Amino acid sequence: MKNLYLVLSLILISTATTVAVDLDSSSPTVCIIGSGIGGSSVAHFLRTYSSSGIGEIRIFERHAVVGGRTATVTLSGETFEAGASILHPKNYHTLNYTKYLNLSVRGPPPSESDSGFGIWNGREFVFKTLSFNSNLPIIQRVVSFANSVLIFFRYGFSLFRMNNFVDNTVNSFLKYYEDFESRPVFETVEEMLKWSGLYNLTRRTLQEELLDFRFSPRITEELVTVITRINYGQSISISGLAGAVSLAGSDSGVWSVEGGNRQMAAGLISHSDVKLHLNEEVESVSFIEQNYQLNTTKGKSYQCGITVVATPLDEVNIHFLPGISIPERKLQHTYTTFIRGLLNPAYFGLGSVSEVPQLVGTVETPDVPFSSISVLKQHKENDMSYKVFSRKPLDDALLDQIFSVRNETIKIDWGAYPHYHAPEVFAPFILDGQHLYYVNAFENAASTMETSAVAAENIARLILSRLSGQKPASTVTLKSFGDDAYDVHADL
């Protein structure tokens, strides 16, 4: 299956045609607020699709580095992903970014893919896979087969129903990679979701969807809940679409960028002829005489013909004049704790650390203070690096119960993704009827690096289609960039 994913991505890269719009109007300055995958992708696609229609591009980042919610942390000299960590094998925009930027892709480390997995309910492990450390392929295959049998006996045919549910969602999402002739430009998130067939999944909870798919209560309360708690820090009351995307994150073949996923944002910015403003937060955006005036914390003002907001507006303080109206939304904070040390097996009622699974997931219960604990790297038998996800901060007293040794501890608070519910209500892509755009409106559907890239690509096309005077739902007049250009689309 992994080889199939690789072949598909190579076909996409090698057979695609990159296109660009040639606009006769004057070239406006584009100001982008936010340097994560969303903001960097907008800049990239504007440059890729427009041969002369876009002038200067400025990106404003309130922090000292680019990347937004893709970030790394250094623990005892080792670098680990601290933000968005994994990508799906069918995330074609981000796969193409790695090819375009000559970045190295890595799969899950062997210790993660072959190690034990357990589901903890606060009192006991209700399920554990077998774990046997061996470099012999035959032993690894036997253990893998035995674990497959164990999982099937635990969850039965609901495992196949889960795969079908995820596959159906992924196949609908693949429509966003179709060529321009068959894929319109979307003015609203609702239009975008209805066109692909994903909209109804945002109207009902994941739990309701799984009931229709005849999932067993056991797989829903255990395996599915573990996955949603790890990937979105939330329960099965999230929307069906967010839930399906979360489950897709457990597929085989997930990958990341060697050295950190933030390199994609940094690379796109450096290749897009952008003026980058680090440590410069935008305080206000005012529409004055057909231009946007951006005022920043450095006391500077910038005139922009187009402004793109590529950061969640939920926890930033930007004043808009005239005011804008978007639905109220709360971000789900994920507290990530990195620890170099050793777990306390007695906390789990076990006799030795080797009995504790290297990935501990949890069910939905107030008895468990964390969502998951995973081994990032085993340095020695009694020296490991861990990542702990939780919905609330973990104080030192609790950590000292869970861990017998803590040589170094790093705590991070992420406003990671929206707090999902159903039915979802979406902010508009166009915030003012002019040229003020909002990439993160799509996050209420699902929040991943790839969904940010997909939304950003639509925003870039929306900008160019509206500048050209064409209706957004129609196909923009396009011309080829040539064989050496960055390849994005193909007929799938």
Image: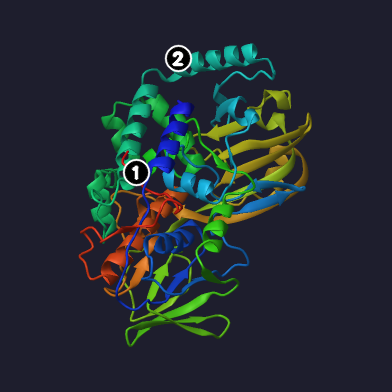
Q: Residue at x 38, y 50 (%)?
A: 420
Task: Please tell me how many numbered marks the rendered image carries.
Answer: 2
**Which residue type does callout 2 highlight?**
Phe
- Residue located farthest toward the front when viewing the structure as drawn: 483
477 relative to 149, above or below: below
Q: Which residue is mark 1?
A: 490
Instruction: Point out residue 269 in the picture as x, y percentages from the top left corner.
Output: 53, 62
Q: Residues within 10 Å of mark 1 (few under 14, many from 20)?
A: some
| Residue depicted at x 62% and y 43% | 388
Q: Nearer the viewer, residue 39 or 99?
A: 99
From the top left corner, tell me how far across and down residue 155 is, in percent: 42, 20
SS for dot 1: loop
Q: Position of residue 280 (x, y in %)?
A: 57, 75
- Residue at the disc numbered 2: 153
Of residue 382 and residue 293, the one placed in the foreground of this image is 293
In this rendering, the answer to whether 207 lies above or below 290 is above
Residue 269 placement, left or right of 4: right
| Callout 1 amino acid | Ala
For the residue labelled by badge 2, is the local secondary structure a helix, a strand or a loop?
helix
Say how the picture is coloured.
rainbow
* Residue at the (56%, 80%) spot, across then down: 297
Query: Quadrant of residue 341 in the image?
Result: top right
Q: Left or right: where does residue 475 sit relative to residue 159?
A: left
Q: Gap between marks 1 and 2, in whole Å? A: 41 Å
x then y, percent, for residue 64: 63, 67
